[in-house]
Image: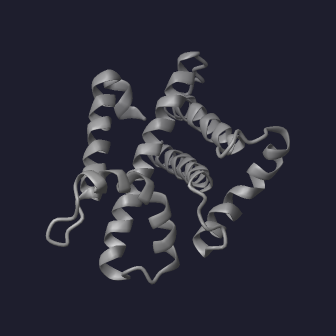
Amino acid sequence: MLTLTFLVTTVIDLYIMVLLLRIWMQWVRCDFYNPFSQFIVKITQPIIGPLRRIIPSLGPIDSASLLLAYILATLKFPLLMLIQAGALAVDPLNLLVGLLTLLKAAGQLVFWVIIIRSLMSWVSQGRSPMDYVLFQLSEPLMAPIRRIIPAMGGIDFSAMVVILILYLLNYLGMDLFQGLWYQL
C-alpha cells in the first residue's frame, strides 16, 4: 500500500506542478520557443488542448490548466484515502483541501525554480536555454527585493529573501491548518 500511495502522490504532485508551471510561464510571457517551454507544453497539451475549447482563458491566466490542476488537487486526498483505508470519502471539505494543496504546490514550485536558478548560476552562467526560462520565471519575484536590498559584495541576496518568505508562508500554513497541512 505504501508503494502505491507514494506512486499516486508523486504522479499527481508532479503533474500539478507541471500545470502550474505552464500557467506561470504564460503569465510571465516566457519564451515558448525554448526547448524547456516546448517540453512543458507538449506534456500538458493532450489534456489541456481539448479543455481549452470548452474553458476560455481569463486574461493572462490559462483557466483550463488552473481548473485541471485544481481538480487533480481535489481528487488527490480522496484517492489516497481510497488506497489506504479502502473507502471513498466524498466531503465538501475536499474542495478546501484541493485549494490548500494547490497553494502548497505553487509555493513548492517557486521554491524549486529559485533553487535551481541559483545553482545553475554557479555552473552554466547564463549560457543554457533553461537559464533564460528560469530567469523569466523568477525575476518578477526577485527584482522588487533587489530594489530594496541591493547586491552586497557581488552577492545577490534576493533569492534567499524569497526563500525565507516562502518558509514563512509555509509555517503560516502549518499554524492555520495544523494537521491537514502536513498531509498535503
Q: Quadrant of residue 28?
A: bottom right
- Give residue 158's position: percent from left, percent from top: 28, 57
* Relative height, residue 110 to residue 68 (above, below): below
- Single out the residue that lies furthest toward the front: 147
The quadrant of the picture occupied by the C terminus is top left
Please name the residue shown 64% across and 44% down the image. Answer: 61
State the residue in front, 180 or 44. Answer: 44
- Give residue 150's position: percent from left, percent from top: 23, 60
State the residue in front, 92 or 154. Answer: 154
- Tag count: 0
- Single out the residue that lies furthest toward the right: 53
Image position of 122 (left or right of 183)? left
Please name the residue shown 38% across and 82% down the image. Answer: 124
Image position of 47 (left or right of 150)? right
- Single out the residue that lies furthest toward the left: 153
- Give residue 71's position: percent from left, percent from top: 64, 34
User: Which colour style is shown?
Assistant: one colour
Please name the residue shown 54% across and 30% down the image. Answer: 98
Image position of 165 (left or right of 61)? left
Q: Quadrant of residue 169?
A: top left
Please name the residue shown 40% across and 52% down the image. Answer: 141
State the residue in front, 53 or 183. Answer: 53
- Give residue 57's position: percent from left, percent from top: 74, 42
Image position of 171 (left or right of 128)? left
* Relative height, residue 50 to residue 91 (above, below): below
State the residue in front, 72 or 122. Answer: 122
